[in-house]
Image (spheres, grey):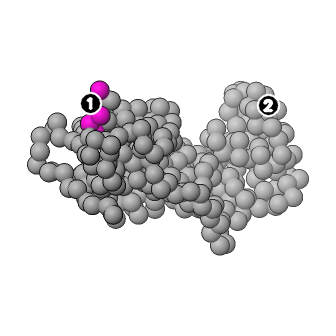
Amino acid sequence: MTNAVTIDAGHNGRSGYKVDASRGQRVGRVSSEWFNRPADERYLSLSDLMASVQSRAERSRTRTVESAAIRVEASRDDAERLTLVLPSADRPVAPTHWSFGQLASIVGAPATYLRQLPAPLAGINLQYGLSSHRAEQVKTLESENGRVELRAVTGPDYGRIYDHELVAAVQKIAGNGTGDTRWKIPGVLDWSTGMYNPRVDITSDTTTLYASDRDVFLFLVDDLNPIEAGRLPDGSPDLYFRGFYCWNSEVGAKTLGIASFYLRAVCQNRNLWGVEDFEEITIRHSNTLPRASRTR
């Protein structure tokens, strides 16, 4: 039988509780995100994250077009600049690194090789591929921010879930993610004492809220309300707490997914320690029925 143990929210910054991080398993997914995210992809609250991804969506539009009707333009005066003219579009769109790779994949061309070619030559290859593309239709995601960018090119059956939709869903239970509800950015384990401190300052080094031009990733915990899972050999309580992380990509770089679990600690480089009852669900983006897979 488990017992809830609530930590005194009014205690000083040195508050915390003893944990046995050797129990359960270690999960490195959050640490990988933490290690690879530059400063401009780190957010200190769900409100800041929401403002960024929602503003991006408000500047975006989608359309489904005939691939053969897309015109590739390249200038001999600028060997690196390549743009696309979409049907009924007012201005040419500039593909991002990601969408260029998607476009090359759709027409069966090697993106790495095309990026090494001068733009006019790459344009000739892309134009030929688009003209002979058997699938005939593609779905685009365009965004305007000074210039019009082509953020994504997918098949016509791609069911887009915007990143702000995931963030909004998390906000319903987690508020700002900074402690205004039970769910918050995690604390830090002190390896020298085995004490887990759920109260740490939220900085770019400690945050677990991330977003790039390709995806979002959020990790939150309920570490102010640990649960007694049993007893340690010395008779002290074996404490763990609830956690979850979720992710999405509105440009087709990732599935939509969520993982939930119990854990005993989060260390400074955001590895999860003492994880138990790990479950993960992923959902493929499709405009028909959602296709989900589950792992434990």
| Closest to the observer, 280 or 202 | 280
**What's the residue at 60%, 50% (across, down)?**
254
Disc number for residue 193: 1
Residue 153 position in % (x across, y down):
68, 52
Principal secondary structure, stretch drawn in magenta:
loop
| Closest to the observer, 1 or 15 | 1
Report the amino acid beneath label 1.
Thr
Q: Mark 2 points at which residue?
A: 113
**Contact? badges 1 and 2 (CB < 8 Å):** no
Residue 54 position in % (x across, y down):
42, 56
Which segment did they paint magenta?
192-196
Residue 239 position in % (x across, y down):
31, 49
Q: Which circle's residue, 1 or 2, is located before the other in the chain?
A: 2
| Closest to the observer, 255 or 27 | 27
| Closest to the observer, 62 or 50 | 50
Is residue 199 depicted above or below 254 in this figure? above
Report the amino acid beneath label 2.
Tyr
Is residue 210 among what the camera can see?
no
